[in-house]
Amino acid sequence: MAAPMLSVKEIERLLAVEFPQVFNEQSAVSIDEVSERGCRVRQAYREDSIRPGGTISGPTMMALADFAMYVAVLAAIGPVPLAVTINLNINFLRKPKQTDLIAEARLLKLGKRLAVGEVVIRCDGEDEPVAHVTSTYSIPPRS
């Protein structure tokens, strides 16, 4: 298996510069690991992510899935900040516990212009997924 184009530290530096509104201490998202065709990221538990009924909100899980796909794409293709989400479909499978969420992204297809992948979100320490996501990213032409 080939090494990723960017390391965790390189992606963190890129995100801090290009997307400080998303990747900062208050957002509580972090990158656990990257590979050539995927990654594992974490959303630390935050009280403000809880919706009525005591569950972690859908928008929190959707944002985590999108972040995971973006990290997976960057790890695979290098520093291309203008890669953008063109589709994201999420299936909520069960009520998540009030704990950290772990998202594992895997690229299913990586072409010149599109990247297609899936993300599985689990509660930290749990085997059963709380959400399954498919997503497509548009990759801008290289100059």
Image (cartoon, rainbow, N blue to C red):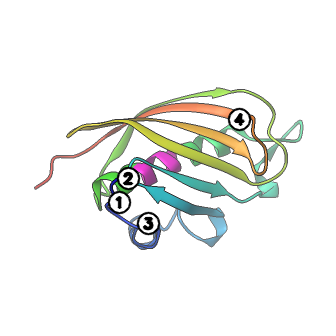
State the CA–CA distance, disc 2 to disc 1.
Answer: 5 Å
Q: Secondary structure at mark 2?
A: loop
Q: Earlier in the sequence, mark 1 or mark 4?
A: 1
Crowding at mark 3 (Cα within 10 Å: few <14, some 14-19, many 20+): some
How far is the residue under mark 1 from the one under mark 4? 27 Å
Which-is-in-front pick, marks 2 and 4? 2
Do tag 2 and tag 1 residues touch (Cβ < 8 Å)? yes
**Relative to residue 86, is residue 113 drawn left or right?**
left
Q: Position of residue 49 (x, y in %)?
A: 75, 50
Q: Is residue 132 above or below residue 24?
A: above
**Label 1: which residue?**
3
Instruction: Determine contact: label 2, label 3, CB under 8 Å.
Output: no
- Residues rendered magenta in the picture: 66-72
| Residue placed under numbered mark 2 in the picture | 36
Return the residue at label 4.
Answer: 129
Q: Earlier in the sequence, mark 3 or mark 1?
A: 1
Tell me if residue 75 comes above or below residue 118 in the rendering.
Answer: below
Residue 58 lies in magenta, yes or no?
A: no
The amino acid marked with disc number 2 is Glu
What amino acid is found at the position of numbered circle 1 in the picture? Ala
In the rendered structure, does residue 68 fall within the stretch colored magenta?
A: yes
Q: Which residue is found at the position 66% from the left and 64% from the top?
A: 28
How busy is the neighbourhood of tag 4: few (under 14 within 10 Å), some, or many (20 plus)?
A: some
Give the class, few, some or many, for how many residues have Cα within 10 Å of label 2's Cα (few <14, many ≥20): many
Picture quarter with the C terminus: bottom left
